[in-house]
Image (cartoon, grey):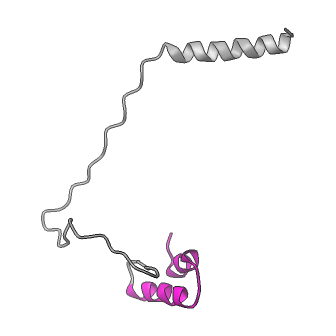
């Protein structure tokens, strides 16, 4: 066994042994988001599906531009760029 391979074996064994003496870390607690009492939208609305594509944005004009991009043969990435999605 060469010195180099003996050193690699030592480093591998040290890494394995140092990882074995640790207790498992506790999972981070999940954050739940509270919905305001006066929230006007239903939280149990059904999912939306479409046959050919959907564009969603916070501005109606941007959504229309995205739909126009899809109708003219653009991809979903093209529509996302056209709507100004970040």
Residue at x 59%, y 16% (from the top left corner): 16
Q: Quadrant of residue 38?
A: bottom left
Residue 19 point in image, percent of width and height: 54, 18
Measured from the top left, where is residue 10 in percent x and y?
Answer: 71, 11
Residue that lies at the very extreme toward the right in this rendered image? 2
Tell me: residue 8, above or below residue 27: above
**x, y (%) of residue 41?**
20, 72
Q: Quadrant of the N terminus?
A: top right
Q: Nearer the viewer, residue 20 or 83?
A: 20
Q: In the image, is residue 52 part of the stretch drawn in magenta?
A: no
**Residue drawn at x 13%, y 63% as measured from the top left:** 37
Magenta stretch: residue 61 in it? yes
Q: Is residue 56 left or right of residue 17?
A: left
Q: Is residue 1 left or right of residue 73?
A: right
User: Does residue 62 lie above or below 44 as drawn?
Assistant: below
Where, by quadrant of the figure, is residue 78 drawn?
bottom right
- Give the residues in magenta: 60-86
Please name the residue shown 73% across and 14% down the image: 9
Name the residue furthest front.
Answer: 51
């Amino acid at each position: 066994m060469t010195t180099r391979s003996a050193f690699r074996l030592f480093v591998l064994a040290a890494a394995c042994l140092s990882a074995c003496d640790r207790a498992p870390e506790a999972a981070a607690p999940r954050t739940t988001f509270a919905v305001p009492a006066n929230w006007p939208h239903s939280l149990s609305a059904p999912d939306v599906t479409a046959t050919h594509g959907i564009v969603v944005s916070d501005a109606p004009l941007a959504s229309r531009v995205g739909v126009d991009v899809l109708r003219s043969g653009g991809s979903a990435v093209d529509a996302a760029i056209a709507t100004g999605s970040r």
